[in-house]
Image: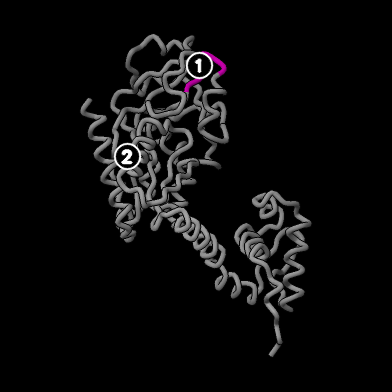
């Protein structure tokens, strides 16, 4: 049996190894850590040398884990998260907090409408709970929820359907119609309310299906029953870039009133009859944190008060 001194293996090297295994690429892993590809490659090679274990089979166009590498990947997968969580918990204890709650929301939404009031009300009532808030695309926060990085998310209706109802609780907080955003020179701007068929000749600006497939799928499902498919004239990498790509009087994109640029004086927003969108709060059914249920209740109460005004 080899006498292996693992003291020379750093947590950073383990994190690099795990990310390379997940990405199946040294280059993509390096981009994730904002490092160069040679830096990642040398770190992995040094770890292989210290362990005396070949972790990856390196081929011309790809890499793959060796059986030994696969074993270490399975054993080490939770190590980095465990260490990070422990440090975060220790910091929270040092600051006087005993519990924590992680919340996710979409970076294209206006947090002051529904997220920040709930967070502020919760922190005022439960001062011994540390709150962490993350934002990203609908797919980002959904994946963070499924991976256990977030306890609860506030997301858009069309993406929440991808969560299995047997495993997740999903509560609609606000239900509103979809709206078409356009330049004020668009002929559709003259209507107070649009029908879906009014959009058949429009050029759709959309989030790339490579970045958020649920968005383009929602648009197709919206239009197809009415005898047409959306004419996608431009794809953006994220929702926040949609407004920047409205360049002609025939361009539109679809959102709802929670979109961050809603109400922009340079744009026109028109509701679409017979459509439904809104904000949905989702969490795992097996997450039994008391602070999670407390936050969910406060958020529901805030939504009910907002809707009654």
**Residue picked out by circle 2:** 121
Q: Earlier in the sequence, mark 2 or mark 1?
A: 2
Q: CA distance from mark 2 to mark 1?
A: 43 Å
| Main SS class of the magenta portion in the image | loop
For label 2, the crowd category at 10 Å Cα-Cα, with few meaning under 14, some 14 to 19 and many 20 or more, is: some
The reply to whether the magenta stretch includes residue 189 is no
| Residue 42 position (above or below residue 279) | below
Q: At 34% across and 21% down in the image, what residue appears?
A: 271
| Percent x, y of residue 235 | 56, 31
In contact (CB < 8 Å): disc 2 and disc 1: no
302 left or right of 213?
left
- Secondary structure at badge 1 equals loop
Mark whose residue sits in front, 2 or 1: 2
| Percent x, y of residue 36 | 75, 52
Position of the C terminus, as image quadrant, is top left
For label 1, the crowd category at 10 Å Cα-Cα, with few meaning under 14, some 14 to 19 and many 20 or more, is: some
Q: At 38% across and 42% down in the image, what residue appears?
A: 154
**Furthest residue toward bottom:** 1
**Residue picked out by circle 1:** 250
Quadrant of residue 155 in the image?
A: top left
| Percent x, y of residue 114 | 35, 34
137 left or right of 33?
left
Quadrant of residue 262 in the image?
A: top left
| Residue 258 position (above or below residue 191) | below
| Percent x, y of residue 264 | 46, 18
């Amino acid at each position: 049996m080899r006498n292996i001194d693992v003291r020379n293996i750093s947590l950073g090297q383990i994190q690099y190894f795990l990310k390379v295994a997940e990405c199946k690429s040294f280059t993509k892993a390096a981009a994730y850590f904002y490092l160069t590809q040679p830096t990642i490659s040398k770190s992995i090679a040094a770890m292989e040398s210290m362990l005396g274990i070949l972790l990856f089979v390196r081929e011309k166009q790809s890499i793959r884990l060796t059986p030994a590498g696969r074993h270490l990947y399975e054993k080490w997968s939770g190590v980095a998260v465990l260490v990070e969580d422990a440090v975060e918990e220790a910091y929270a204890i040092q600051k006087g907090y005993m519990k924590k709650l992680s919340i996710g929301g979409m970076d294209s939404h206006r947090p002051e409408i529904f997220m920040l009031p709930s967070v502020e009300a919760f922190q005022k009532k439960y001062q011994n709970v540390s709150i962490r808030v993350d934002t990203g695309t609908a797919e980002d926060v959904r994946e963070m929820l499924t991976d256990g990085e977030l306890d609860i998310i506030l997301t858009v209706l069309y993406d929440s359907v991808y969560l299995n109802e047997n495993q997740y609780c999903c509560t609609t907080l606000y239900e509103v119609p979809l709206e078409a955003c356009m330049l004020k020179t668009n002929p559709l701007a003259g209507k107070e309310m649009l029908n879906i068929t009014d959009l058949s000749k429009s050029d759709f600006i959309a989030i790339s299906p490579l970045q958020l497939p649920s968005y383009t799928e929602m648009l197709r499902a919206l239009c197809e029953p009415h005898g047409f498919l959306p004419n996608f004239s431009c794809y953006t990498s994220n929702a926040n870039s949609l407004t920047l790509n409205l360049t002609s009087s025939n361009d539109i994109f679809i959102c709802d009133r929670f979109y961050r640029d809603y109400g922009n004086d340079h744009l026109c927003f028109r509701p679409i009859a017979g459509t439904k969108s809104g904000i949905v709060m989702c969490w795992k059914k097996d997450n039994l944190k008391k602070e999670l249920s407390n936050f969910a209740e406060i958020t529901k109460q805030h939504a009910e008060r907002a809707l009654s005004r």
